[in-house]
Image (spheres, rainbow, N blue to C red):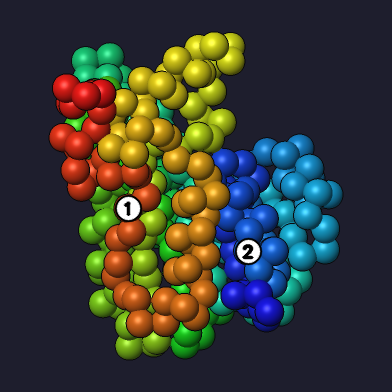
Amino acid sequence: MGKLDGKVALITGGNSGIGLTAAKLFVAEGAKVAITGRNQTTLNSVAAELGPNIFAIQADVADPASMVNAVSKAVAFFGRLDIVYANAGIASATPLGETELSIFEEVLKINVTGVFFTVQAALPHLKEGASIILTGSTRATDGAPERSAYAASKGAISSMARVFVSDLSPRGIRVNTVVPGATRTPIWKKTTDEETAKLEAAQARTIPLNRMGDPKEVARVALFLASDDSSFVQGAEITVDGGARSAPLGAPIFSLRG
């Protein structure tokens, strides 16, 4: 038996990166999964690969009406909704002194407003025992240069999650946050394999476990939060970053032995 047998999940940004890995894992654990994304080509590819337990919906999390439509389609197709993994987000650089308003606002619109309205769209269909999973980031607290909008958006996720907990606990709906650190996803890939390897090696030296994370390692935490194994876990932030957030001075870059 799978950990998600009989459950239906919605994963935004489920056509690439961590979202896609989670979709595959959720299906393997018995769930039926609706994924959303903006790229119809990649959505079609995922649907073809994973078969009848995946329902791919082209949608834009920045458009509340689009998300209401996506949720309605998912519920009509699978008959219910038990899990919402609000994973979609962008990480555009916003250097101070050089950033246009439209770029800054787009990050906040997708990463904050989009998450709120994804949850709001799903809420009428969620029953007691449902699980909502948000995606934070260690960028919210590490002060990475040129990431003001992204850091602010992920800090907002942590704050908003606490309000969701207060609002939804009386209905028996759980809300928790996965906080990934540096993870090997397409967003990290450079023009050549050599450049990518160099970037990964540099990142590894800032992580106590001396490597970047794998998307599966984040997806497994999302699986735990989606499943009944976490039935009394409410308002948690689970950081998946190899120790970079909790013990930054333990990273090889700070070690005389590194």
Judge from the rendering whether residue 196 lies leftward or rightward of residue 166; answer left or right: right
Rendering quarter of residue 17: top right
> Does 236 sit above or below residue 17?
below
Q: Amino acid at mark 1?
A: Thr
Q: Amino acid at mark 2?
A: Phe
Rendering quarter of residue 41: top right
Classify mark 1: residues with Cα within 10 Å, few (<14), some (14-19) or many (20+): many
Mark yes or no: residue 74 visible: no
> Does 167 sit above or below residue 98?
below
Q: Secondary structure at mark 2?
A: helix
Rendering quarter of residue 166: bottom left
Residue name at image x 41 percent, y 21 percent: 201
Please tell me the numbered disc located at residue 71: none
Q: Secondary structure at mark 1?
A: strand
> Mark 2 = which residue?
26
Residue 103, horizontal then vertical, whole percent = 38, 27
Residue name at image x 52 percent, y 75 percent: 227
Name the residue nearer the viewer: 41 or 186.
186
> Mark 1 = which residue?
239
Name the residue nearer the viewer: 2 or 78.
2
Name the residue nearer the viewer: 73 or 8.
8
The quarter of the image holding the C terminus is top left
Judge from the rendering whether residue 97 lies leftward or rightward of residue 5; answer left or right: left
Classify mark 2: residues with Cα within 10 Å, few (<14), some (14-19) or many (20+): many
> Does 103 sit above or below residue 139?
above
